Image (tube, rainbow, N blue to C red):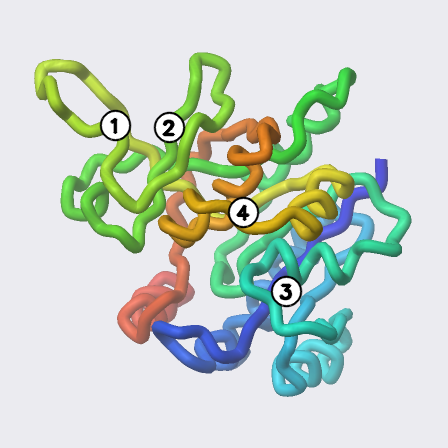
Amino acid sequence: MKIISMIPARYSASRFPGKLMQDLEGKSVIRRTYEATVNTKLFDDVFVVTDSQIIFDEIVNHGGKAIMSKKDHDCGSDRIAEAVEFMDIDIVVNVQGDEPFTEVSSLKKLIEVFKNDVDKGIDLASLMVHITDWEEIKNPNTVKVITDKNSFALYFSRSPIPFPRDESVDVKYYKHKGVYAFRKEALLDFYRLPMLSLEASEKIECIRYLEYSKKIKMVETHVQGVEIDTPEDLDRAKKLWK
């Protein structure tokens, strides 16, 4: 089974433009993420895939591997799909470019999903983390996920799900972390299938897989990490790095 990692990297992020090129204790955020992913030693290869010459040069000039994306894509999955379409691989792991604290144990769990899936019934796997702060649960920038009893995703939303109609019920809330592992075929299906209304409404790309009846296995991780979406997140990352 050939497994690679792709790190989609846009320069013009809407909330924090140029965030991937911000300095994080002597190296750019994207370079920190790339090196952390390589250092897991879990992958046959690691690439940054980007629409930005600045990010491309940043990786290549420091000895890394990068691919220029030919098209202007709506989401990271599309960008990765274009890059891997003609590669001889089985599994693609998408690591977000703004997560420099990528760590081994969570990625290992994702890869194990496919190693144990002898019938090839799982299309993709992704990470979730238990959250308890109600402000975070309500925050539309935090994508929540609910699963069935076998940890397959039922739905993702920016709203609190499930809604606590009966507050006496002990419900756990899970944040979806944007780290995915795909079968190549499922990723290419995503690339070719049009966006439907639920994905368009929530602006959550993995909903497309559910709308087309793909099976998403959710894996719980206890590593929260820091996703750099704002200048404040970058300050937190710097403190954590030190």
Q: Is residue 19 above or below residue 146?
A: below
Depth check: give the residue in front, 197 or 213.
197
Q: Give the mark nearest the N terminus, 3 or 2.
A: 3
Q: Toward which corner of the image does residue 69 lie, by quadrant?
A: bottom right
Asked if labels 1 and 3 touch by Cβ distance under 8 angstroms, the answer is: no
Asked if labels 2 and 1 touch by Cβ distance under 8 angstroms, the answer is: yes
- Separation (CA) of disc 4 from disc 2: 16 Å
Q: Position of residue 43 (x, y in %)?
A: 75, 48
For marks 3 and 1, give the one nearer the viewer.
1
Q: Which residue position holds label 4?
A: 179
Q: Which residue position holds label 1?
A: 162
Left or right of 186 on screen, residue 203: left
| Crowd rating for badge 2 (residues with CA inside 10 Å; few <14, some 14–19, many 20+) | many
The answer to whether residue 56 of the structure is visible from this angle is yes
Asked if labels 3 and 4 touch by Cβ distance under 8 angstroms, the answer is: no
Q: Is residue 22 above or below residue 134?
A: below
For marks 4 and 1, give the one nearer the viewer.
1
